């Protein structure tokens, strides 16, 4: 078969690619390419049948990837702002003109204080090459502020690391062999489709499936049982389960004695969480707590699929810690199909020294600089904070792989910060997003079909390779090339700024331990390379936790040394009747905003076929809460709190539990009828562990009588 670079007009070729999006499945894609008008053109995208996790199936979103790549609104040329910030009016300029001006502006700001320059990026691509390789090298050399990338996963990731020593768990394929699967804070059908297919196989074999979620999601609907707890109370439920396990002596004493640390103080802590108290805190019944503990002990193997939904509240980190204690107490780590899976990302040792070059932080005098760190979850506050010697102003933002005006909390404040006329903003993008409307320069970036990348998954055990299938659309460039050209213009001469994308991909993963045989050329030819672990993989069957003690740490001395509670605790939501009864009286409904099935964060929102399937922005509200407010199904409602207000279409349904409303997200604001989305109402408070966003710690009130029209 010919390769993609040497195609005759009547030939096609399959190119090995990898999905780059923020999903644990990280699917292997096969792109069918043909030659048209002297250019390579993709005509089909499909899942690779021979990649075990993908098994030939792509999700609805990525199966329509060509609609996104060849979208009529795709950015094709560098653009310079000509209107006011937020208006989205631009004129076409050349790459040389844009990059010359950007470099000059950044040099001017850096001459005063390079910390006034802030990179803002996240998981628009999960690729290690197009994500943070050349970009981090550039910002380190510049001396720019560091970014704490907290908006999604740090609460759970840090909590799991304090408890287990790493982020790993049973492999996706093993879930087919479980007899009990608990989906805790996850809608796997939407966000983990390939694990869900394994769970369905387990179900056909007789396994019991339980969903723990404030919302009766598509996943919860298909489970045998749905426990609809109140948002932010997961830690109380986990401690309640520990209480029952200890009370009934449903404990693997041998495993606890050999492989855990801190059982006695944990048991003492859990003694405070009897089922009656837990039922009151969580808004469920004591019988549900008792039965869940019973099932968890008596059904083997038992696996917990934990996800990031449950960590997006004040006590999210402690909740994850408490859940991660359960398989060690009950001995479920002994089984390959047992334990808890939040992420497998800890299995892939990224070579951060080679990839990001933190040594470039050394200044002209050779001494390492330590720039300030900006938390991406509080960008609205930081953009508007009065300048001081301790907090120099943010004078420039370089945004790539993210859409903060849509996705960051407390959106009205974020937009106000981006609207500052004195803020120099550069955005690397595929489309003119909500954030792009505020850019001074808008630079067209390539999509996954147009560049080289290597992707570290967080839901399976294969390093994924991405080969460019087509020529870049328009004048778009890979992120790496944009930062290479900026580095050259600023005068950075370090050899690493000349590294090719293939060289970076080769450097990305350490060749040690389970990745000792990592070989970029082998991976790119096959499309993937499995790490060196057994086919039947039970990571902690015999202990061996990579914590300081070598054990599962119910009690964490590391946390104690930081002045943090060393035991899993229940931290109630910041916004709730326990922590803030006055606020709860004014805003009695808890709002959560989980991902819509047809969107992935704010990606794919502008793909019309997917947006048409999703409909318009809406709010799901329980019939009891709707009746109390005179709200009819299909009517327009006003949703508000002290941070903002938005108008949504009501869906009266018992999928939302009483006291909770659900606004599926994340819509581009410009595609909503009132140019707002759910983040108009979310706040910038941070979690107990990990400094992460608290999107689901949000009280609102809902009123009937708003006016709206069909969404854009």
Image (cartoon, rainbow, N blue to C red):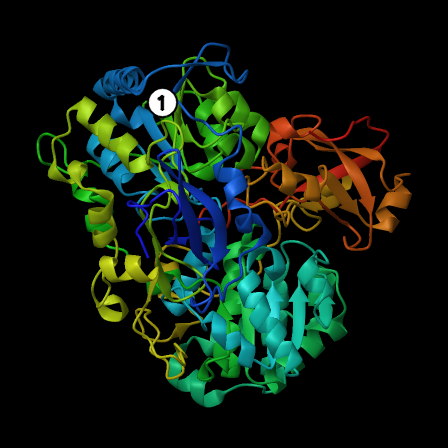
Does residue 385 show up?
yes
Looking at the picture, how far across and down is residue 439, in whole percent? 44, 21
Drawn side of residue 183 relative to residue 52, left or right = right
| Residue 139 falls in image quadrant | top left
Left or right: where 529 falls relative to 629: left
Report the quarter where the N terminus lies.
bottom left
Q: Nearer the viewer, residue 266 or 404?
A: 404
Q: Quadrant of residue 681?
A: top right
Pick the front one: 667 or 623: 667
Residue, disc 1: 396
Q: Residue at x 28, y 37 (%)?
A: 480
Q: How many marks?
A: 1
Judging from the image, what secondary structure is the residue with disc 1 in?
strand
Which residue is situated farthest in the bottom direction here?
254
Q: Position of residue 613 (x, y in %)?
A: 69, 44
Judge whether 218 appears above or below 691 on screen.
Answer: below
Position of residue 246 relative to residue 162, above or below, is below
Could you tell me residue 257's position as x and y percent? 41, 85
Quadrant of the image occupied by residue 181: bottom right
Percent position of residue 406, x then y: 55, 33
Locate the C terminus by quadrant. top right
Q: Nearer the viewer, residue 427 or 528?
A: 528
Give the answer, above or below, for where 143 lies relative to 159.
above
Residue at image coords 49%, 77%: 174
């Amino acid at each position: 078969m010919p390769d993609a670079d040497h195609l005759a007009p009547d030939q096609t070729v399959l190119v090995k690619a990898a999905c780059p999006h923020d999903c644990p499945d990280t699917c292997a894609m096969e792109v069918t390419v043909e030659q048209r008008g002297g250019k390579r053109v993709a005509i089909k995208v499909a899942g690779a049948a021979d990649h075990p996790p993908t098994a030939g199936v792509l999700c609805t979103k990525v199966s329509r990837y060509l609609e996104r790549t060849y979208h009529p609104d795709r950015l094709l040329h560098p653009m310079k702002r000509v209107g006011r910030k937020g208006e989205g009016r631009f004129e076409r300029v050349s790459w040389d003109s844009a990059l010359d001006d950007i470099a000059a502006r950044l040099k001017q700001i850096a001459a005063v204080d390079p910390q006034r320059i802030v990179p803002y990026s996240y998981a628009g691509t999960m690729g290690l090459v197009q994500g943070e390789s050349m970009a981090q090298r550039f910002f380190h050399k510049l001396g720019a502020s560091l970014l704490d990338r907290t908006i999604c996963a740090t609460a759970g990731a840090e909590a799991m690391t304090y408890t287990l020593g790493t982020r790993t768990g049973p492999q996706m394929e093993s879930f087919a062999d479980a007899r009990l699967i608990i989906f805790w804070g996850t809608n796997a059908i939407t966000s983990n489709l390939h694990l869900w297919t394994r769970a369905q196989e387990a179900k056909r074999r007789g396994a019991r499936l339980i969903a723990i979620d404030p919302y009766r999601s598509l996943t919860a609907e298909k489970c045998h049982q749905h426990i609809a707890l109140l948002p932010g109370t997961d830690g109380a439920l986990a401690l309640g389960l520990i209480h029952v396990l200890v009370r009934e002596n449903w404990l693997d004493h041998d495993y606890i004695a050999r492989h855990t640390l801190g059982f006695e103080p944990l048991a003492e802590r859990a003694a405070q969480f009897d089922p009656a108290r837990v039922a009151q805190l969580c808004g469920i019944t004591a019988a549900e707590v008792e039965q869940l503990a019973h099932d968890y002990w008596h059904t083997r193997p038992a696996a917990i699929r934990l996800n990031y939904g449950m960590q997006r509240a004040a006590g999210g980190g402690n909740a994850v810690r408490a859940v991660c204690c359960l398989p060690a107490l009950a001995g479920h780590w002994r089984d390959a199909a047992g334990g808890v899976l939040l992420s497998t990302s800890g299995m892939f040792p990224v070579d951060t020294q080679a990839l990001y070059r933190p040594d470039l932080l050394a200044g002209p005098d050779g001494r390492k600089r330590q720039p300030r760190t900006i938390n991406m979850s509080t960008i609205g506050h930081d953009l508007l904070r009065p300048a001081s010697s301790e907090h120099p102003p943010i004078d420039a933002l370089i945004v790539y792989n993210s859409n903060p005006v849509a996705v960051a909390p407390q959106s009205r404040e974020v937009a106000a910060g981006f609207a500052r006329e004195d803020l120099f903003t550069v955005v690397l993008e595929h489309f003119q997003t909500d954030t792009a409307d505020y850019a001074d320069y808008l630079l067209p970036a390539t999509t996954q079909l147009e560049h080289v990348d290597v992707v570290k998954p967080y839901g399976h055990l294969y390093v994924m390779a991405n080969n460019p299938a087509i020529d870049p659309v328009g004048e778009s460039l890979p992120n790496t090339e944009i930062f290479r050209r900026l580095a050259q213009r600023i005068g950075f001469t370090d050899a690493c700024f000349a590294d090719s994308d293939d060289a970076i991909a080769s450097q990305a993963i350490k060749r040690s331990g389970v990745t000792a045989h990592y070989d970029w050329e082998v991976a790119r030819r096959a499309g993937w390379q499995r790490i060196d672990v057994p086919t039947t993989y039970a990571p902690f069957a015999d202990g061996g936790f990579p914590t300081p003690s070598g054990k599962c740490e119910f009690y964490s001395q590391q946390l104690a040394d930081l002045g943090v509670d060393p035991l899993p605790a229940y931290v109630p939501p910041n916004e709730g009747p326990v922590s803030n009864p006055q606020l709860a009286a004014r805003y009695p409904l808890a709002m959560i905003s989980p991902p819509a099935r047809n969107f992935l964060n704010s990606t794919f929102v502008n793909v019309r076929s997917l947006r048409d399937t999703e409909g318009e922005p809406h709010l799901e509200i329980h019939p009891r809460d709707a009746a109390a407010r005179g709200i009819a199904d299909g009517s327009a409602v006003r949703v508000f709190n002290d941070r903002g207000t938005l108008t949504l279409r009501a869906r009266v349904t018992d999928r939302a539990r009483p006291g909770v409303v659900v606004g599926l997200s994340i819509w581009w604001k410009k595609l909503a009828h009132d140019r707002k989305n759910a983040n108009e109402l979310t706040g910038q408070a941070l979690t107990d562990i990990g400094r992460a966003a608290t999107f689901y710690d949000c009280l609102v009130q809902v009123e009937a009588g708003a006016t709206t029209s069909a969404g854009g």
